[in-house]
Image (spheres, rainbow, N blue to C red):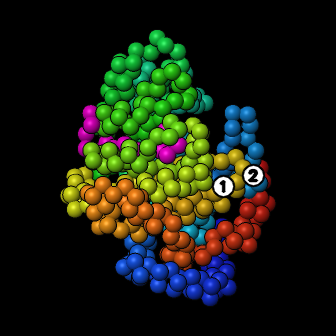
Amino acid sequence: MDRICPELIAAANQALTKSFQQDFRALGESLSRRGLDIKNILAESASLTVALPSWGFSQAGTRFGRFPIAGEPRNVAEKMFDAAVVNDLTGITPRVSIHVPWDKPIDSKILKRQATSLGLAFDSINSNTFQDQPGQRYSYRFGSLSHTDRAVRRQAIEHHLECVEIGRALGSKALTVWLADGGSFPGQQHLRLALERVIGSLREIYSALPKTWRLFTEHKPFEPAFYSTVVQDWGTSLMIAQALGPQAACLVDLGHHLPNCNIEMVVARLIAANRLGGFHFNDSKFADDDLSTGSIKPYQLFLIFNELVDAARDPETKKSRPPFEPAYMIDQSHNLKDPIEDLMLSAVEIHRAFTKALLVDRTALARYQEMNDVVMAERTLKVAYETDVSPILAEVRRQAGAALDPVAVYRRCGYREAKACERRN
């Protein structure tokens, strides 16, 4: 069993059609009273797509252990089948973001053909210099692109150049760089020189990018470095992007911020600088990373999309060069949920936040902001956020041939059970 049978999806949808149609009509009438045409919102909502992480299809772990789930994919080819299931059921996840060397293809051309046959394409290639790999000559224990040893930096640069070549073969258009480089004790690292070495290394990688590609730099305030992380916040990420050139931009990982950080303001600042490259969607309660998107802070997710929709509709932003085209990718891998269910739910929550942001009365909001009417400005946002847009999301899925209720269809089809038998080691 490699795909979800379309007839099963259609039958499941048919059983829900009557109640779904009632909900969709009721929402349309409600939006009409607010001057919104549900058909226009539906068309805009259908424009959203988000990439799946290749590393998200196996159970992750904690510092204390890992609990595998039956039927986990054993290689990147099997992960592509799982990714196709997520897209079959949600209709909005047609791309996969690959992590190298975790999911380095044996033959990129074969993997690309498989993806095409499954209706999938490839998004950003993610490098990995935060782990030492078997057979690696030099260790990244004390850094990679920032290392004091030129030979270690050379090794890390070559790894990124290899990622670019793999990406070329797969049809990717971006390289995402997250560095664990930093220090855990005062005096361990020369703070200015470490950043200079990172920028110098990235310049060489940047010069090898195809002209149609982008390079995303990702920041994280701490972990595994607990005293000084080289790329610790959006400001440093912005400095790097500006030093490299117009193909470089900043990637915002929602879990890579200190508690109570105003992430939507970070997004607004990067939009203003025309350096917002994209997102790794997940969620966080404390300083944890990779929780399911929208599971902890759904209102924050909505406020982020409020900034994105506002920018997309701004005539000035539309004139920006390079164009305003943020890349949307999920970055999560949890230890408790079925990974396929987790990714489906996260994709739906991202879609939900985006669609709610489409409902904001921007004319009224701008007027209230100019009048300094705090209550009405906030209320304008809350009216959109509190609207249940589930019927719109379901209709987008239905029109794409996907499931009105993705999780219910997934559980009914027995895909996990079938893979548990097929993928025994």
Circle 1: element type: helix
421 part of magenta stretch:
no
Residue at the (74%, 72%) spot, across then down: 412
Tell me the quarter of the image containing the N terminus. bottom right
Residue at 38% across, 37% down:
234
Residue 404, visible in the rendered structure: yes
Answer above or below: position of 203 versus 333: above
Residue 308 location (% of width, % of height): 37, 57
The answer to whether the residues at label 2 and label 1 have Cβ atoms under 8 Å apart is yes
Residue 279: percent from left, percent from top: 44, 50
Give the crowd class for mark 2: few <14, some 14-19, many >=20 residues within 10 Å: some
Q: Would you identify the image quadrant in which residue 406 lies?
A: bottom right
Q: Which residues are magenta?
A: 242-257
Amino acid at circle 1: Pro
Residue 135 is left or right of residue 353, and the answer is right
Q: Disc number at residue 339?
A: 1
**What amino acid is labelled 2 in the image?**
Ile
In this view of the protein, can residue 106 be seen by the observer? no
Residue at which label 2 appears: 69
Identify the secondary structure beneath mark 2: loop
Instruction: Point out residue 15 in the picture as x, y percentages from the top left corner.
Output: 67, 85
As drawn, is 248 to the left or to the right of 141? Answer: left
